[in-house]
Image (cartoon, grey):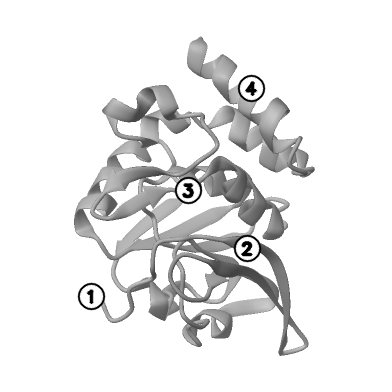
Amino acid sequence: MRFEHARHELVERVLRFKGIRDERVLAAMRKVPRHEFVPEPLLSEAYADYPLPIGHGQTISQPYIVALMTAALELSGGEKVLEVGTGSGYQTAILAELAGRVISIERIAALAEGAREVLRGYKDVTLVTGDGSKGYAEEAPYDAIIVTAAAHRTPPALPAQLAEAGRLVIPVGPPFYQRLLKITKTGGEFREEELEVVSFVPLVEGAG
């Protein structure tokens, strides 16, 4: 019950206060048990609004950033979504609550296996181990793509795998601080919008 109360407080006192208005996103954030995606020693911090380490130099993102990026994808249900950087699987679970199908790719095998275990109840989630900077052409095109690590520049494979009217949300820039970009494909062209200044772990390219 304390975790359920903590999720409610996170949504109502933090996410709404910070400007998240998409009710479907808020409902998903209220439903998905973030404490199941963090290491046991950090359970008491599971619903704090900051990132937490999950091992292998990776983090589970700040809840506000998860909500912001998810809302920017404008999911209405039924979409096919590619997630680059499964990590703990928390963002994957949020996406699974909102989209029709989620394909998530993670380069670190140990994290992919851990996420596979905790996400076993989601039947419309496919987890892949590999280099997410290349996207996942086997399932393209995607209605939405979300990248949960920072790229120096947008990997060209990702916008190329968007469907018409598809949205790509990605942090781009040097270490420590990046621009969170939303890239929308319209008429075969790409429109870029800056959403926020963020700080993500680096996207490693070329990892098999």
Is the residue 107 above or below the residue 190 in the image? above
Q: Is residue 170 visible?
A: no
* Mark 1 or 3, nearer chain start: 3
Residue at 35% x, 35% y is 38
Q: Which residue is mark 4?
A: 8
Residue at 56% x, 20% y is 6
* Mark 3 or 4, nearer chain start: 4
Q: Which residue is mark 1?
A: 208
Is the residue 108 above or below the residue 163 in the image? above
Q: Which residue is mark 3?
A: 61
Which residue is more in the foreground, 27 or 38?
Answer: 38
Which kind of residue does numbered mark 3 sit on? Answer: Ser
Q: Which residue is mark 2?
A: 197
> Is disc 3 placed on a helix, strand or loop?
loop
Q: What is the number of the mark on residue 143?
A: none
**Residue 76: x %, y % from top left:** 73, 52
